[in-house]
Image (spheres, rainbow, N blue to C red):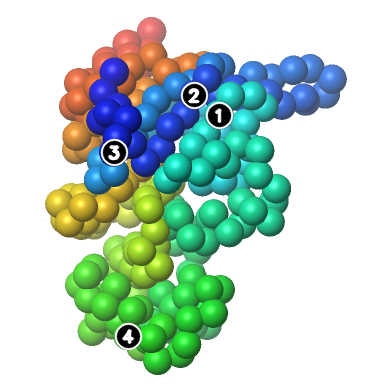
Amino acid sequence: MSDGGNASKLIEVQDITRVFHVGGEEVRALRGVSFGISRGEWVAIIGQSGSGKSTLMNVLGCLDTPSSGRYTLNGKDVSRMSDDELAVIRNEEIGFIFQTFQLLPRETALANVELPLVYRGIPARERKARATAALEKVQLAHRMHHRPNELSGGQRQRVAIARALVAEPSMLLADEPTGNLDSATGEEIVRLFAELHQAGNTLVLVTHEPKLAARCPRAIRLSDGEVVADGPGREVALGIGQSVMAAGGT
């Protein structure tokens, strides 16, 4: 298993479980999940529906806490933090990128990108400068005064990526980031992720798409709440593709 070594590890997940109680029954969504992600890595977490990848994303994003085990992010044990403490971690450490973009429809691209800085109490002039710089990184500064309904799907995702970048978080966490895009636009977004990776950003992409996982240097495959593969993205994604094709042929 590739974890990049302890010295540079940004994320450490140790024997994480997540148990839900549904209708009097116990559902184990995560079963002893362990891995590490180093600073600057670009990693896909891949699995089919019911694999546990969405539950794991919620834990990594500090939207949920594990039932047992330990999750350390940037040297902080977030496993047992309060809701208020987790909110601070989400704001300071994580840049979220959603499949559905999650942009405020009545605000401009610039205002949407400024939002994380508003929550931090950053002065207006600095907010505008940093948001403009973030839009420049995603090649969308020329559309900063347009609202979401005036932008294409790919442009809206670029705004969402700029918003995730603007507060300089420890990691970018993307949930099916190409899921609502056509193949050509999705390819543009993947190339943008590659540029961000080359610039030293830590990216974690949660996806069910083997093609997307194959573009990542590393992929972690989940099945039934367990890590069943962890290695080069192309190799792990090929395993996913083979299992899907086999299932489709029965």
Which of the two discs, 2 and 4, labels the residue nearer the N terminus? 2
Q: Residue at x 19, y 34 (%)?
A: 217
Quadrant occupied by the C terminus: top left
Which of the two discs, 3 and 4, labels the residue nearer the N terminus? 3
Q: Which residue is mark 4?
A: 129
Which of the two discs, 1 and 4, labels the residue nearer the N terminus? 1
Q: Rounded to the nearest whole Å, what is the CA distance between mark 1 and mark 3?
A: 18 Å
Q: Dot 2, how many residues are within 10 Å of its Cα: few (below 14), some (14-19), or many (20+)?
A: some
User: Would you say residue 200 is visible in this rendering?
Assistant: yes
Mark 3, secondary structure of its residue: loop
Q: Mark 2 or mark 3: which is in front? A: 3
Which of the two discs, 1 and 3, labels the residue nearer the N terminus? 3
Quadrant occupied by the N terminus: top left
Q: Which residue is mark 1?
A: 70
Q: Amino acid at mark 2?
A: Gln
Q: Rounded to the nearest whole Å, what is the CA distance between mark 2 and mark 3?
A: 16 Å
Q: Mark 3 or mark 4: which is in front? A: 3
Asked whether the beta carbons under mark 1 and mark 4 sit within 8 Å of each other, the answer is no
Q: Which of the pair 21/84 is nearer the observer? A: 84
- Percent across and percent down for residue 115 are 49, 75
Q: Which residue is mark 2?
A: 14
Q: Amino acid at mark 3?
A: Ser
Q: Mark 2 or mark 4: which is in front? A: 2
User: Would you say residue 144 is visible in this rendering?
Assistant: no
Mark 4, secondary structure of its residue: helix
- For residue 96, side relative to residue 185 (left or right): right
Q: Dot 3, how many residues are within 10 Å of its Cα: few (below 14), some (14-19), or many (20+)?
A: some
Q: Rounded to the nearest whole Å, what is the CA distance between mark 2 and mark 4?
A: 39 Å
Mark 2, secondary structure of its residue: strand
Q: Which residue is mark 3?
A: 8
- Percent across and percent down for residue 83 are 69, 51
